[in-house]
Image: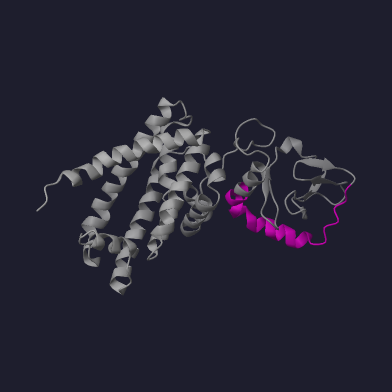
Amino acid sequence: MIITCPKCQFARNIPDEQIPPRSKVATCPSCEHRFQFREIAEDTDTSTLDDLTSTDANNNANDNSDFEAKREVAQAQAQDAAAAYLAARQEKTKTQDEPPQGPETSEPLQVEVPFEDLEHFGFFAGMYQTIRRTCLSPKLFFSVMPLRGLIRPMVFGLMVTEFVLIMSAFWQLSGVPDLTTIFMEQQGMAPLSPQETLNPMLLFVMVPLLYLFELFLSTAVIHGVLSILKSGKRGFEGTFRVMAYCQAPVILSALPFGTILAVPWSLAVTFIGLKYMHSTDYPHVALAFAALVAVFGVVFFLPMLTMPSP
């Protein structure tokens, strides 16, 4: 049974056999709110389930807001995934480097990515929660992330990239200077016009292809180095997910000068994500990034340097 605190949304999954048959009131370990979590016949003696994990037969069910608690518990059912994230955060405070452990088990606790659980969150809430967790709690976000395939992370990163590109065209049309445009003009390069940026062929064909090429190349290089160092414990998919979801801070580039903050933030999230996804250390991650910089220098910048000047 998943028991959810109606006040702070803290939740924990308690096996039915561990809940005494007469318990119907729980005490939240996070906010210490007492609430009724199920109905029991009035003529049956009841006990209280304290801290959502242990029982105390001496406590009485004296919650004066039973009706309101039951109503809020019903409303909270659609937020089970978010509550599970809060539970993981509570568990994470017990250890600094090891993934949180599920209750009564040695298996690492895993929490669904909101963008991969849109049935519960909805599209916009799923995007917002994924960006928020990636940017503000990357250590916890990646350490409890399950492996559910490559498609959703890839779509997430691509959507962020497309949104930033569209917003860049919007700022150009509004006459607001964009950091990328200023940089290109300083280098003597002609930036794309808004009409060129919003060209469907560029927006829906070229940008996705370039993004996928960069995503798979960077994942292959970084995971290759981590594998050589015996640090890629969760496989290629684990590295791929980090590289895709680390696009979350790039959303700041949608603001005129947001790139100044977006680039270092995204880099920091990537370092943290790789460390806690694979339970490795920062020196190994740094070596992998050094290899990536070398490869990107050869692939992208060397041809530019060797081009004959007009």
The overriding secondary structure of the stretch rendered in magenta is helix
Is residue 132 something that shows in the picture? yes
Color encoding of the figure: one colour
Tell which residue pokes out farthest to the right in this image.
58
The location of residue 103, given as percent across then percent down, is 68, 37
Tell which residue pokes out farthest to the bottom in this image.
174
The location of residue 194, given as percent across then percent down, is 25, 66
275 w.r.t. 70: above or below: above
227 w.r.t. 285: above or below: above
Q: Nearer the viewer, residue 183 or 262?
A: 183
Q: Looking at the image, which residue is at 75% across and 48% down?
A: 29
The location of residue 192, given as percent across then percent down, is 23, 62
Q: Looking at the image, which residue is at 79% across and 40% down?
A: 54
The location of residue 213, given as percent across then percent down, is 29, 42
Task: Tell how many labels.
Answer: 0
Is residue 198 something that shows in the picture? no
Q: Quadrant of residue 299?
A: top left
Position of residue 177 in the picture relative to residue 149 (left or right): left
Q: The N terminus lies in which quarter of the figure?
A: top right
Position of residue 186 in the picture relative to residue 111 (left or right): left
Q: Looking at the image, which residue is at 14% across and 46% down?
A: 307
Report if residue 242 lies within the magenta region.
Answer: no
Position of residue 29 in the picture relative to residue 107 (left or right): right
Query: Where are the magenta residues, as a range?
Result: 59-84
Position of residue 279 in the picture relative to residue 5 (left or right): left
